[in-house]
Image (tube, rainbow, N blue to C red):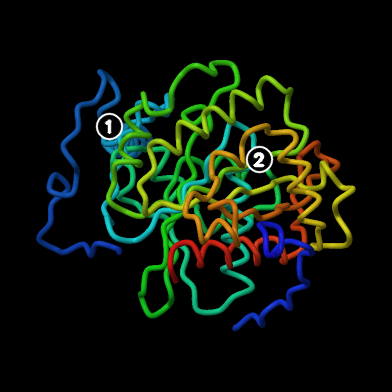
């Protein structure tokens, strides 16, 4: 008799796919007064060339800066889902669970190891006057390649990224949002659906694929129970079209289940996570009689590890990627769940 674990007896070794490889002219008729910009100078500074140049530069910078706003509270950020058809992959989890580095690792894999994909930030997700987001979008490609962990994290959070084929066919949108808006262990009774941001995402007509991030041996038993309860609330907000992927992140924290690089005893890892997050799998129990005979739970489980962090001589935390088999399996599951 087939069961939920039949697909997870052993993580298969996957063969990595091949990587495809003005100057303004001065005229005789112009006078000195015509060439000078009109500026208001402090007394005694009117004819000082250095102040003149600096004054112009400062004026331009002040004008540019006045067009932008910096948001410090993520709940104050206005978000817009412009593409209401392409599925949204929501990386869901508490602060510091690895959402940003999961996005970084998956994006690097799609960019460097697979041919035919385009990964780019969705600029319309946040207002065009949002300075933080503008800088994130401008620096996306550069920070995607950053080896210093802090650089990647500081420039790739609370953003929406689109993944499409080179021919222009959209596949999915990947959303990395603030963990404290999903679940804050310090405020376990604060509901996620009490935030404008969360409601805007859950109410969008797009199919959502929630990648719920779990960490082995995370915090303590009570925090894990509270997190399971938050996931139960999420399930109530889901549309019947939405799907769930449970991501066992930081699998190296339960290294007894790692057989070799990128190969995990997933059945044993699932049992371990089921024990730690009591009641979690019951939330996704399959209720359709015939299907439940073959697959008792309506969700997928993927083990994952983005990479290793080591301190260099400058006290920076350097990021080194782990096996491509981890993002390979995650991407394969995402494709299945978005219907591609």
Above or below: residue 302 compared with residue 19: above
Viewer-side residue, 170 vs 64: 170
* Residue named by callout 2: 214
Q: Which image quarter holds the C terminus? A: bottom left
Q: Looking at the rendered structure, which numbered label has been put on residue 279?
A: none
Residue 52 makes an appearance in the image: no
Residue 338 in the image: x percent, y percent? 44, 63
Q: Residue at x 64, y 56 (%)?
A: 105
Q: Which residue shows up at 76% across the image and 56% down it?
A: 266
Q: Secondary structure at mark 1?
A: loop
* Residue found at x 52% / y 34%: 231
Q: Are marks 2 and 1 in contact (CB under 8 Å)?
A: no
Q: Is residue 275 left or right of residue 334?
A: right
Mark 2 and mark 1: span between their CA atoms?
Answer: 42 Å
- For disc 1, the marked residue is 66
Percent across and percent down for residue 17 are 67, 80
Q: Is residue 87 above or below residue 148?
A: below
In the image, residue 177 lies at what x, y percent? 47, 39
Question: Within the image, what quadrant is residue 324 found in?
Answer: bottom right
Which quarter of the figure is the N terminus placed in?
Answer: bottom right
Quarter-of-image position of residue 302: bottom right
Query: Few, some or many C-alpha atoms within 10 Å of disc 2 (few <14, some 14-19, many ≥20)?
Result: many
Q: Is residue 65 visible?
A: yes
Q: Residues within 10 Å of mark 1 (few under 14, many from 20)?
A: few
């Amino acid at each position: 008799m087939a069961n939920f674990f039949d697909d997870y007896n052993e993580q298969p070794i996957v063969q990595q796919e091949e990587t495809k490889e003005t100057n303004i002219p001065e005229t005789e008729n112009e006078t000195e007064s015509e060439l000078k910009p009109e500026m208001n100078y402090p007394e005694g500074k009117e004819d000082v060339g250095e102040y003149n140049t600096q004054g112009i530069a400062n004026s331009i910078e002040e004008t540019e800066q006045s067009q932008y706003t910096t948001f410090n509270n993520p709940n104050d950020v206005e978000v817009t889902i412009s593409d209401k058809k392409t599925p949204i992959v929501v990386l869901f989890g508490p602060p510091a669970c690895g959402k940003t580095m999961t996005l970084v690792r998956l994006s690097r894999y799609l960019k460097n190891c697979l041919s035919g994909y385009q990964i780019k930030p969705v600029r319309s997700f946040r207002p065009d006057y949002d300075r933080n987001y503008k800088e994130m979008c401008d620096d996306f490609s550069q920070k995607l390649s950053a080896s210093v962990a802090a650089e990647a994290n500081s420039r790739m959070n609370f953003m929406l990224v689109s993944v499409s084929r080179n021919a222009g066919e959209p596949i999915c949108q990947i959303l990395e949002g603030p963990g404290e808006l999903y679940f804050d262990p310090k405020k376990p009774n604060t509901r996620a659906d009490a935030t404008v941001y969360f409601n805007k995402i859950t109410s969008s007509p797009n199919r959502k694929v929630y990648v719920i991030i779990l960490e082995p041996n995370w915090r303590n038993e009570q925090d894990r129970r509270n997190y399971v309860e938050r996931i139960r609330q999420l399930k109530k907000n889901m549309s019947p079209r939405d799907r769930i992927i449970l991501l066992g992140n930081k699998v190296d924290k339960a290294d007894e289940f790692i057989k070799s690089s990128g190969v995990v005893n997933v059945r044993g890892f699932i049992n371990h996570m089921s024990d730690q997050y009591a009641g979690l799998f019951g939330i996704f129990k399959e209720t359709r009689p015939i299907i439940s005979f073959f697959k008792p739970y309506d969700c997928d489980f993927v083990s994952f590890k983005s990479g290793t962090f080591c301190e260099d001589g400058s006290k920076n935390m350097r990021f080194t990627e782990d096996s491509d088999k981890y993002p390979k399996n995650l991407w394969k599951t995402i494709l299945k769940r978005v219907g591609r």
